[in-house]
Amino acid sequence: MTGKPKILLIGMGGVGSIAAYSLTYTNKSDLTVVVRSEYNTLKTTGFEIKSIDYGHIESFKPYKITNSISDAVSENGGGGDGFEYIIITTKNIPDITPIETILEQCYDDESENKSTIVLLQNGFGIEKSILKKYKNANVISIVTMISSSLINNVVNHVGSEFAKVGYFPNGNLSSKEQELSCFKLIELYSNEKNKIEYDPDVKWTRWRKLMYNATINPISTLTDCDIGRLNIFGGDETLLRPSMIEIINIAKSDGCELPYDAIDSLINSDPGVYYSPSMLVDRRKGNYVEYINILGNALDVANENNIEAPILKTMFWLLRCRQMKLMEEKGRFELPEIRPGPEDGFEISYKW
Amino acid sequence: MTGKPKILLIGMGGVGSIAAYSLTYTNKSDLTVVVRSEYNTLKTTGFEIKSIDYGHIESFKPYKITNSISDAVSENGGGGDGFEYIIITTKNIPDITPIETILEQCYDDESENKSTIVLLQNGFGIEKSILKKYKNANVISIVTMISSSLINNVVNHVGSEFAKVGYFPNGNLSSKEQELSCFKLIELYSNEKNKIEYDPDVKWTRWRKLMYNATINPISTLTDCDIGRLNIFGGDETLLRPSMIEIINIAKSDGCELPYDAIDSLINSDPGVYYSPSMLVDRRKGNYVEYINILGNALDVANENNIEAPILKTMFWLLRCRQMKLMEEKGRFELPEIRPGPEDGFEISYKW
């Protein structure tokens, strides 16, 4: 059998759309995308893309578009081994949509030709629940520095795509095999417009990205302030810097030395622009936020290694309560009319 | 000269309105109230009061109503010594309206017959800036356990009025004099419907109230959750209890022993009701919040005495950034179009 390697890409947000476009542009793979809420738009008119890398594309329609994972699988002949890579670009919100519920529909851990799972998502420790459930899974990490957002079917891609591709080590697989699957993906993904690099140390890269995501994201979300306003309103030395130091300390306990001198450049990132981090944008839209993969999993490491991280911990619980409130508002559960007391042993029962 | 003692009461919110009604009902003083935004309503139709203590009052109009402090002073003959008591019941938000700007209009620290200043307000250390500016000031504290709110010109008074009246010690005055002014006020204020007690230890009483106000208030505000939801969503052991312990520790360093066993009853206060604390109500209305007098002043004591209070400190700075954002939205200042960098030395210039 010849033919291009098949890739399933799940999620067409700002980041996923550029990934899909990059793969289409490179044209070395046979791509199917799964998109839910914007399915009809994408299928009929496509997305407009305004890209710093690719210029202005009036209408981008991937060749194969489905609105469910099961459709993608059955159109591909059925079974859990049809795709060489499954790239997941959705938000990582295990309290709402655990990633296993996605994989159950398209991944077969027992197959000879099992897919390689690619997580193009934020956060730390996001591979753990997958490796616990699927002993043979080859899970690849993409950490991207892209700035791209999808608003009203227009992809606004303002920061050039620079991605690092590496693997989450799985003791049941050879590191050679895992490494090769990374290089092959880089080959399918790279073109002269983007920059895709091999990442020899995914854990370090993900800790390094948490220096931004676990600090600037929750602080801006809880204060309703973009990064520029945090600077001006007194957040630098009271919230941003000390929380970044907490991340440095936790990462160190996990064997990763992060650069202290990155703190100042992170605090002053996006110079000249009152940049609203993605979690703040999500909050303002009334979307769920990725507080578990970004803060919770880092705090698990802190707890295991007895590292103090009071600012991160406080923000985790504040965000958790907010997220629960949002779940209630979205009808995920109902509370009793009379507030239950501690003696009632009330427990939330989720609807779906 | 005979005549009843003159009282100036500033602010007719939920708490201030009941105080004004209580003084009117007792009818032992000559009361003038200052009310700004609801002046016309109060003057023409009055406020409706639904009170657990006084029953249903269709229209309450105090005898003397003014819409500015200066009007009250001039109608009273001018000068800063016309009122025996000046009761301030407005929100205590020194970042927006420092209390000194109120007193400048009605208080004369040099007068023989100077007024006694009465703070019917939340928070800790709220007397300090007054005593710093006015060396001879006799400042009285009222801490009230009332539950009363003003919504659409209706005062909903659901929790009985129980107030403690004591003095903030001023070394330039005799304690006898300060004590007597408390007892006289109690006499003018008390009636058979309310419960007004002398408070021999204002500092302790105010720390004790911070166990609620400095914890449940900011946590509910930052999470958008009432107290019942905080219980259910996991806030008890992660935010509420540890922040209350921080208050206990700070108070102890300030010489006040607070009861640990109050924690459980505070966490489970207002049983059966999803009660939204006042700061959360303010936030939802888009009002400023009292984060300085409630959290900031307590943290000043923590800093002086080297007491760790990481949860309170984190919440203080989160609330500060939110408040600054709100000030910007309300037009209090403008930011440059291009985000300034650290080298620009930008400073906010406030408009009023």
Image (tube, coloured by chain):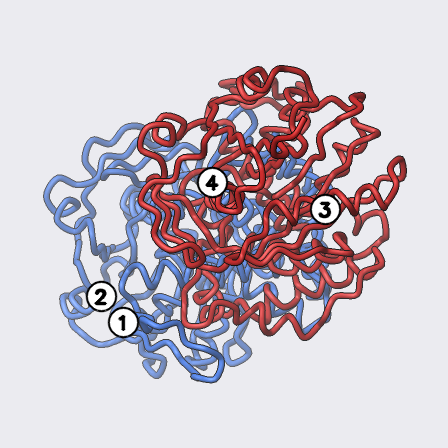
Chain colours: A blue, B red
Query: 10 Å neighbourhood of mark 3: few (<14), some, or many (≥20)?
Result: many
Q: Nearer the viewer, residue B337 or B228?
A: B228
List the residue tagged with mark 4: B13
Residue furthest out toward the left: A44
List the residue tagged with mark 1: A106
Disc 3/disc 1 C-alpha distance (Å): 75 Å
Where's the C terminus of chain B, which quadrant?
A: top right
Disc 2/disc 4 C-alpha distance (Å): 57 Å
Q: Nearer the viewer, residue A309 or B233?
A: B233
Q: Secondary structure at mark 4?
A: loop
Q: Percent x, y for residue A170?
A: 52, 75
| Left or right: A349 in relation to B63 | left
Q: Amino acid at mark 1?
A: Cys
Q: Both on one chain, marks 1 and 2?
A: yes
Look at discs 1 and 4 and give the one toward the viewer.
Answer: 4
Q: Both on one chain, marks 3 and 1?
A: no
List the residue tagged with mark 2: A69
Q: Amino acid at mark 2?
A: Ile
Disc 3/disc 2 C-alpha distance (Å): 73 Å
Where's the N terminus of chain B, which quadrant?
A: top right
